[in-house]
Image (cartoon, rainbow, N blue to C red):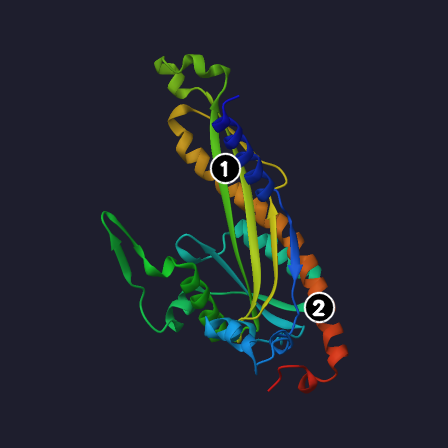
Amino acid sequence: MHPNTVLKAAGAAALVAVLAACGHTVQTTSGSKYLSTYDLSDHDLDVLVGTDEGIAAAADVEPQLRFPARLGLARIDAQGLTAIPPAEAKAWMALAERLGDGYGEFVPVSPLVAALAAPEAPRRVVMGNLAWDYRTSLARVVREVRLGAARQHLDAVLIYEASGTAAETSNPLAVTKLALIGFFLPTEDVEAQGAAQAVLVDVRNGYTYGMASAVAEQPVQRITTSGNTTAVRRAAAQEAGARAVSALTGEVETMMRDLRLALAERRAEFGTPEAEPGTR
């Protein structure tokens, strides 16, 4: 086997492994406790903030979420913050019902409200023949989501994205594709895979409480004509993304339950909120 073939196969296997990774993580650690491990009177200060002062600022944040809470739900894609499709909204509504009132409520972050809360209009970036909105920068999108969530008075926001990839292969009927009638026969098999991921962020201080990821349990399969392949691929990819979101809600549910327990244990450890490290 040619070395390039081996590398390509290994790369494909690694990509499949990454996409197949489903799970969640939870964080309730203290920023001030993290920073306290550095002796600010010696060289550690130079190591910590001398090179990049933003490192200390990023670390100096505390978890402050309490359940029940007003939880924002923000869907992002390549265009930025977007409306939640009905199929995905149904999956999130089912999650809210499973969690119950003890966790609060899920409130979709409105793209219109987020746009109104943004301090400035998006700028256009042009390079050669390519042009896109500067708001498609991920950091800018997350900032816009937090602004919109703040305008809606939400405590934390679950930012998620979903994607579907579809490919087609010719089936035995493809032998007719050279004939005019072949244009109207289902000669193409389309299969789409979906993946989704989410992060739960505090609206006020940006603390990251947890992350979750999932893939669609079953691929979406369709049969289509060669003349309708593009439309069917697009529809299959969208459905695969929705299936991935449905799987994601299961991971988010477990993440929420683990997070609520971890936050309760943290408050019990440090006593009243005023006694928690980093509280000012």
- Amino acid residing under circle 1: Ala
Q: Position of residue 263 (x, y in %)?
A: 70, 72
Badge 2 element:
helix
- Amino acid residing under circle 2: Arg
Task: Looking at the picture, tell me which residue is in the foreground, 156 or 225.
Answer: 156
Q: Is residue 194 left or right of residue 179?
A: right
Residue depicted at 63% across the width and 78% down the height: 36
Task: Looking at the picture, tell me which residue is in the foreground, 239 or 210.
Answer: 210
Instruction: Classify the position of the C terminus by image quarter.
Output: bottom right
Gap between marks 1 and 2 measured at Cα: 36 Å
**Image quadrant in which you'd find residue 212:** bottom right
Q: Position of residue 66 (x, y in %)?
A: 66, 75
Badge 1: residue crowd in 10 Å (few <14, some 14–19, many ≥20): many
**Eyeballing the image, is 183 above or below 263?**
above
Q: Are the residues tagged 1 and 2 within 8 Å (C-beta)?
A: no
Per the image, the residue denoted by label 1 is 236
Residue depicted at 36% across the width and 61% down the height: 135
Q: Position of residue 182 (x, y in %)?
A: 40, 16
Per the image, the residue denoted by label 2 is 260
Question: Residue 213, which numbered label?
Answer: none
**Image quadrant in which you'd find residue 144:** bottom left
**Eyeballing the image, is 80 above or below 32?**
above
Mark found first going from the N terminus, 1 or 2: 1
Front tag of 1 and 2: 2
Residue depicted at 68% across the width and 68% down the height: 103
Q: Is residue 226 left or right of residue 46?
A: left
**Eyeballing the image, is 79 above or below 216?**
below
Q: Position of residue 123 (x, y in %)?
A: 29, 63
Q: Is residue 251 left or right of residue 121?
A: right
Task: Looking at the picture, tell me which residue is in the foreground, 141 or 109.
Answer: 141
Badge 1 element:
helix
Q: How many marks?
A: 2
